[in-house]
Amino acid sequence: MPDELSGGMHRRVAIARSLAAFEPKMFLYDEATTGLDPVNADRICRLINELCKDGTGMIIVTHKVVDAFKVAKRFLFLQNGRIIFDGDRSGLLQSENPDIQEFLNEFRCEFD
């Protein structure tokens, strides 16, 4: 029954529904891993990567830097509706913008 599914299973079912309805050329994920435990968050990231192997595009909106680094090659950092960074992982990590650095502290704390 739907009310018995975990958060991660709800996310996987939502992805399966979109695949069953049509053959998408692009996926939009809005906070796909928010509220999930690390194991299910990792499963969702792996599923996203698997779905994009054939060239299907994706846009992911997330506040979880670790998950973004698992799936993305290009990063846009928005602040007050403006793009303040557009580039790859290396460029993001080397950014001197204090707001970006504060945001990246989550990623750095994962490996301390």
Image (spheres, rainbow, N blue to C red):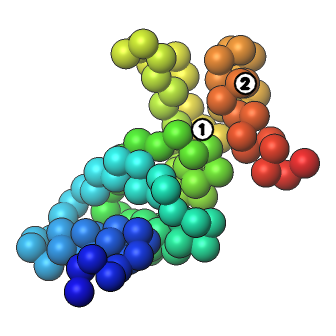
Q: Is residue 26 above or below residue 22?
A: above
Residue beneath label 2, please? 101
Side of 45 relative to 6 (left or right): right
How many numbered marks, from 0 up? 2
Answer with the quarter of the image where residue 53 lies: bottom left
Q: Residue furthest left?
A: 21
What's the amino acid at mark 2?
Answer: Gln
Q: Residue at x 48, y 31 (%)?
A: 76
Relative image position of residue 19 (x, y in whole percent): 20, 74
Relative image position of residue 108 (x, y in whole percent): 80, 42
Q: Which mark is residue 25?
A: none
103 or 57: nearer the eye? Answer: 103
Side of 45 relative to 88 (left or right): left
Q: Nearer the viewer, mark 1 or mark 2?
A: 2
112 or 2: nearer the eye? Answer: 2
Q: Residue at x 35, y 68 (%)?
A: 11
Q: Quadrant of the N terminus?
A: bottom left
Q: Secondary structure at mark 2?
A: helix
Side of 96 relative to 27 (left or right): right
Relative image position of residue 33 (x, y in whole percent): 47, 58
What's the amino acid at mark 1?
Answer: Asp
Would residue 20 be visible to someone looking at this image? Answer: yes
Relative image position of residue 71 (x, y in whole percent): 53, 57
Q: Residue at x 43, y 72 (%)?
A: 8
Q: Residue furthest front?
A: 3
**1 or 2: tag closer to the N-terminus:** 1
Would residue 42 be visible to someone looking at this image? Answer: no
Residue beneath label 1, please? 88
Q: Residue at x 53, y 72 (%)?
A: 40
Cα distance in 3D space between marks 1 and 2:
15 Å
Q: Secondary structure at mark 1?
A: strand
Is disc 1 surrounded by few (<14), some (14 to 19) or many (20+) residues within 10 Å?
some
